[in-house]
Amino acid sequence: MGFLRSAFTTSLLLAGNAAAVDPIVMKGTKFFTKNGEQFFIKGVAYQQEAGGGPGGSTGSSNKYVDPLADASVCERDIPLLEKLGVNTIRTYAIDPKADHSECMAMLDKAGIYVVADMGEPALSINRDSPSWNVELFERYKGVIDNLGKYDNVIGFFAGNEVTNNNTNTGASAYVKAATRDTKKYISDKMADGGRWMGVGYAANDDAEIRINMAQYFNCGEQDSAIDFWGYNIYSWCGKSSFTESGYDVQVKFFSNFSVPVFFAEYGCNTVGGAEGRLWDDTTALYSDQMTDVFSGGIVYMFHEEENDYGLVKVSGNKATAMKNYNVLQSKLADVKPSSTSMAAYNPTNSPAACPGISKDWKAADNLPPTPDSSLCDCMMSSLSCVPSDDLQEKEYGDIFGYVCENDPSACAGIKQDTETGVYGPYGMCNPKEQLAHVLNAYYTNQKSSANACDFNGAAKVVSSSADSSCDAALEKANSAVAVAATATAGSATSSSTGGSTENAAAPASLRVSPFMTMGDMAVSLYVLVAMGVGAGMVML
């Protein structure tokens, strides 16, 4: 079987190179093939244990199986995808170091494109302790580098339902920063001969935030705005209608949107489970009622699993189409969406105005800084007080807590306040680097008192070794710290923190004390953000 599979996939690679799909481009609110034909997404979510669906992932596992790394699995499934009549799959997590050439060639030959989420369960923007940092940016760039060489990649999602209600809207600032930076990364590649690939966001359908969400990601400088908007919607259940499902409301709202919109997930199963799905929503989605505004959608999902949203049952090496697969196949075969040509289409919609800060929206227009490992390196080399070599990450919280409560200005460099849009320059560094900055700032504020860089052996004094090439970057960062410190001033609740802090040296017992009680939410945020870098992801 090994030789046969190798011969088969090699032939597909050669055929794919000879008859590659036409790359997709964007113009205004629509997608087009490069030769000018309008493109509608007819998609399926394709990843086992994907972590998508209504409400997103509810498990705590950080494991995932790359759906495009095993050619034998692609050989099994791609014929079923092609027979179904889809032209796009959505993946939720791929390994940026894996070889995807065989699967991508098979998809190409079948006329199937890919939209890929850039995160993975252990490394994505976490709604409960959001951050946009060096490690995340490296991950996202790796996905772009890996998949971007294939013409059948439409683009990427910077996040999936990261903000899912009005209690965590601040997390959207980090997703928009990720959008800005990955778009710039792609743009730089285009300048060197690369092609366009979009960066979008997949949002849930929450009535309290959906308008603010769509406006926020579309507003402001377009270099930071999404290229397309994915909408995860499960409101058409059983025998419903265009109006009963609320699809008419969505069409009316997005009729003024300035970029392509499509369903990033759809396929309600509350009436009769997966096999009870009638797919009348598919017929509506590609009808004249919707095609002027929506560019198609992605059915959730290919694999039948415990959540009962599947189209196909997989057992070992065998994949069997389910009844609702056949129903969807029939519906997709019948759709004939009205279209226009790229030459005849003249966009008229403008970007939205940014939503104001309110009880239901806590993300300001100003975004977190672009992660820059070289700045973190420069900062580390410039310090005089750093964590001890044997300090464990689990011990960081006590020190962050003590310093940020007793000397808030020392934590200004890692401040991240989405509501005011004030960010310290070092919030994008790793936890150890953030702690080093805080320790050094505290030590400096204590006029380099010997016991201010001790913390019962948790910190140590070192000699600064910053290179002159770091001067400009550090000067700019110091200015940003000063701004953040002004915004931080007076944030601590302890009466002992008013005015000078020169006598606030750390107690010797700190390193072994339990986590300190915080009276100030802002201080808790410092710790959550700094320690959240390695936290398990809540939502891809």
Image: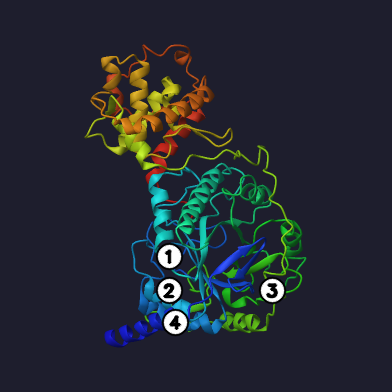
The tag earlier along the polypeptide, 2 or 3, is 2
Marks 4 and 1 in Cβ contact (< 8 Å): no
Q: Which residue is mark 1?
A: 147
Which quarter of the figure has residue 530?
Answer: top left
Disc sitting over residue 18 in the figure: 4
Q: Position of residue 424 (x, y in %)?
A: 46, 32
Q: Position of residue 111 (x, y in %)?
A: 52, 79
Q: Which residue is mark 2?
A: 104
The tag earlier along the polypeptide, 3 or 1, is 1
Q: Identify residue type, mark 2.
A: Met
Q: Nearer the viewer, residue 427 or 470?
A: 470
Which residue lies at the image location 35% right of the left edge and 40% below the top edge? 374
In this view, the mark in front (2 or 3): 2
Which residue lies at the image location 75% right of the left edge and 70% below the top edge? 241
Q: Identify residue type, mark 3.
A: Tyr
Q: Which residue is mark 3?
A: 286
The secondary structure type at the circle numbered 4 is helix
The tag earlier along the polypeptide, 4 or 1, is 4
In this view, the mark in front (3 or 4): 4
Q: Nearer the viewer, residue 52 or 14?
A: 14
In this view, the mark in front (2 or 4): 4
Q: Residues within 10 Å of mark 4 (few under 14, many from 20)?
A: few
Marks 2 and 1 in Cβ contact (< 8 Å): yes
